[in-house]
Amino acid sequence: MKAVRLMQLGKPLEEAEVAVPDISASEVLVHVAACGICHSDAHYRAGISLINSLPVTPGHEVAGRVEAVGEQVTHVSPGDRVCIHYLVSCGACDFCLRGNEQFCAKVQMIGKHRDGGYAEFIVLPGRNVLALPDEISFEQGAIMMCSTVTALHGLNKARLRSGESVAIFGFGGLGFSALQLARAFDCGQIYVVEINPAKLATAATFGAVPIDANAGDPVRQILNATRGNGVDVAIELVGSCGTMQQAVRCLAVQGRTAMVALSKESMSLLPYPDLINKEAELIGVSDHLASDLPVLINMARSGKLCFPQGMLRSVGLNATQINAALDAVEKSTDHIRTVIVPAVKKWRRGH
């Protein structure tokens, strides 16, 4: 099969012909129909988030159709539409049994620790494969598996309540998802902090107050807009020193900041004014949980989540196109997300 692989850190991805993976009794082979290009993939390519074993096929936002199943798999069948939970864990340790599989000592992230969806086929344990309703496109189903569900986990960790105000730092796939999710939770005013004029215009179209970081200090702009109070919840999706500090300093009394973005940068805070005096909270958000996905799928199925035409762009399973899309992600492109859509091939018989 064809795959686009990371061969060396700091170098462009390369096309390769690799064997279609075999499956065990408990595994599922999925024919990839869509795979989102995430900012994390650009971090992996650049070496910001280190990968210990190369080469590897990136891609952790995956949806497709079941090609084949092992004899122990009963919840899906060949031809079924599915989406994929990207954390492969042991399923038996204390963390897994408590539903916190992202902390499993044996956890593997597809596209980083094991081959992912920048390929025609991918193999996963059956428990990582979920049914994708007909109402949800493969493209939306793919990006929901990271950008949308991670935004959901971040807002849940921040304990967003009805009527509370929210500041979203960064308006890519996660930011757009966070905006829709916050609306679905019946939040109060939403502020979107960005430097890209097109993304700010899109945020305004969807009911948020755009905060142009190029026009002045975003913290001051948010405080002015909230009569000096600040926001109840901030979610940081950029990972720069400046935005991480701003996401804390814009908080209201007893506000909560959810830190989501990967970063190599450090930040400094003044403990008393930034945290102690406001009883503010700084919360780390690591990936998401398998238990978040059914809730998210139901929200998308009911129309509470969508990616309108023009928000997504597609490329083929082509190294040149994918590298260009990763370059664009690093430069804050105007559109929200790029999705790889491999050419459809004739199906082999499932077993």
Image: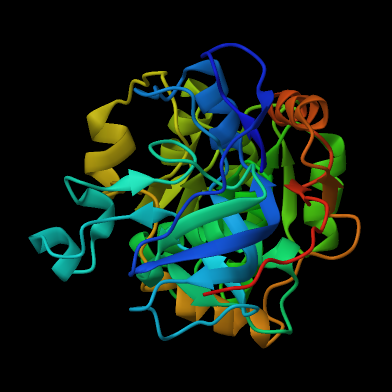
Q: Nearer the viewer, residue 197 or 98?
A: 98
In the image, what residue occupies the spot 48% across and 56% down? Answer: 123
Quadrant housing residue 204: bottom right
Residue at image position (91%, 55%) is 310
Question: In the image, what residue occupies the spot 53% across and 30% down?
Answer: 243
Number of numbered discs visible in the structure rendering: 0
Give percent across and percent down for residue 82: 59, 73
In this rendering, is residue 68 above or below 218? below
Looking at this view, is 231 or 103 the one in front? 103
Q: Is residue 259 visible?
A: yes
| 195 up-or-down from 294: above or below | above
Q: Is residue 284 left or right of residue 104?
A: right
**In the visual, does 323 lie left or right of 223?**
right
Q: Position of residue 321 (x, y in %)?
A: 82, 31
Percent position of residue 247, x then y: 47, 39
Tell me residue 342's x, y (percent). 78, 50
Farthest-out residue, left: 94
Nearest to the observer: residue 145 or residue 202: 145
Q: Quadrant of the N terminus?
A: top right
Q: Please say whether residue 178 is visible from this viewpoint.
A: no
Instruction: Give the image's coloring scheme.
Output: rainbow
